[in-house]
Image (cartoon, rainbow, N blue to C red):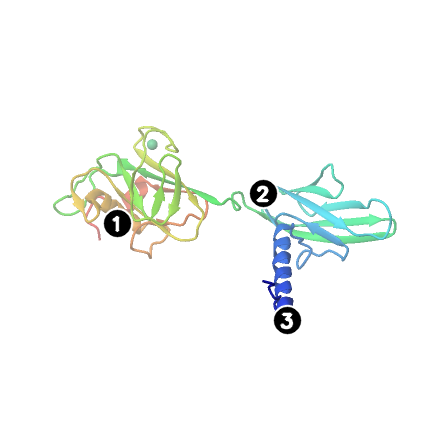
Amino acid sequence: MHRLPPPRPLRLLYYMLCLAVVATIISACAPQPVSQAANQAEEGLSLYAPSLAVETGGRLPLSAFVTMDGQGAPEFQWTASSGSIEPTMVANEVDFVAPDSPTTVTVGLTASLASERYDGTLQIEVLPPGSLKSTALITIEVDASTLHGVWVDAAHPKENVTPPLKIKGTFRYDSETQEAFAGGSWPVFDMRDDGQKGDRVAGDNIWTIVMNFEKGDAKVYFAFDDNSSFRVEWESGLAWALKSAWIDLDEFPDDTSNPAFIPDGDKTIRWTADMARSAGLYGPRK
Ligand SMILES: [Ca+2]
C-alpha cells in the first residue's frame, strides 16, 4: 500500500529537525574556533587551539585560517607576550610553548598578503604543573613509632600498635594498580612499610599508602585499624585514639566526624611525631 507523506507543515518540521541534528553533529566534530570574546580576530581570520589552557612548559598547537581576495599564500606572523612560538612544517600552524611560571599570555597573529592584512589574538591561561591532570596522587604516611604507649581509656592507658597498620575510608582502592575512587563504605586496606609502591624506606616504621584518585572536590574520609585485640567501636582502641587525635589536626578541624582530604591535586598527608605530641596521644584526652 502506498504510504502517504506527512502533511506539509509536519514535513517542514521534520526536515528542520534533521538539519538541526546534522548541524549539531558537524559542530561537535569540527575544531572549535576560539576567535570570539577574549579572542579577537578580524572577520576573514580564524584562530584555532585545542584548548585555551596549558600547564607551565607545556605545548599547545595553534592554527590559523584566512580568507583573502588576493592570489598567493599569505604570510603569518605570530607573537607571544610570554613563552615562545615554534614554527612547524606548515605555514599556518605553530606550537605555542608555555613559559615556566603561571600567567596569562596573549598570542598575536598577523596574516598579510600584498596590501591585505588581518590581525587576531588569543588569550591563553598558563596554569601550574598538574592542573590539567585528571588524577590526583594522594600519599598518606603514618609514623607508627608514635603509636606506642597510647592512652585509649583508663583501663587501656598504654596501647601499642600491632602491625600491619591498616587504612579504611570512603574510597575504593586497588592495591595492585593503586587506583582509587571516592565513595565506598570503609573497606580496609593494609598500608606498607616494605619500601614498595610509594613507601619510601622499608622497615622505618613509616607506613604508607599511595592512591591515584580521579580528581574530585568532595571530601574523602579516612581512619585506621591494626591487629590489636582491644577494640573500640569499629576499629582497634589504638586506631580509634589515632583517628580521634587526627580529626582535630587535618585540613578540616571543624568537621569532627573523621579525618578527611579532598583529592583535588597531588598531596602527601602525614602523621608525625610532632602531631602525636600536640594531640596529647599519651594521656587522657581533654
Ligand atoms: Ca616505610
Q: Residue furthest left?
A: 155
Quadrant (top left/top right/bottom left/bottom right) for the N terminus = bottom right
Which residue is identified by label 2? Answer: 56
Which residue is identified by label 3? Answer: 9
Residue at position x 72%, y 42% in the image = 93
* Residue 167 horizontal/vertical position (percent): 30, 41
Which residue is identified by label 1? Answer: 244
* Residue 228 horizontal/vertical position (percent): 19, 38
Residue at position x 44%, y 50% in the image = 216
CB at disc 1 and ligand 1 closer than 8 Å: no
Q: Assign ligand 1 to one image quadrant.
A: top left
* Residue type highlighted by circle 3: Pro
Residue at position x 33%, y 54% in the image = 253
Nearest to viewer (mark 3 / mark 1): 3
Q: Between 13 and 54, which is closer to the camera in this rendering?
A: 13
Label 1 Cα neighbours within 10 Å, binned few <14 / some 14-19 / many ≥20: some
* Secondary structure category for the residue under label 2: loop
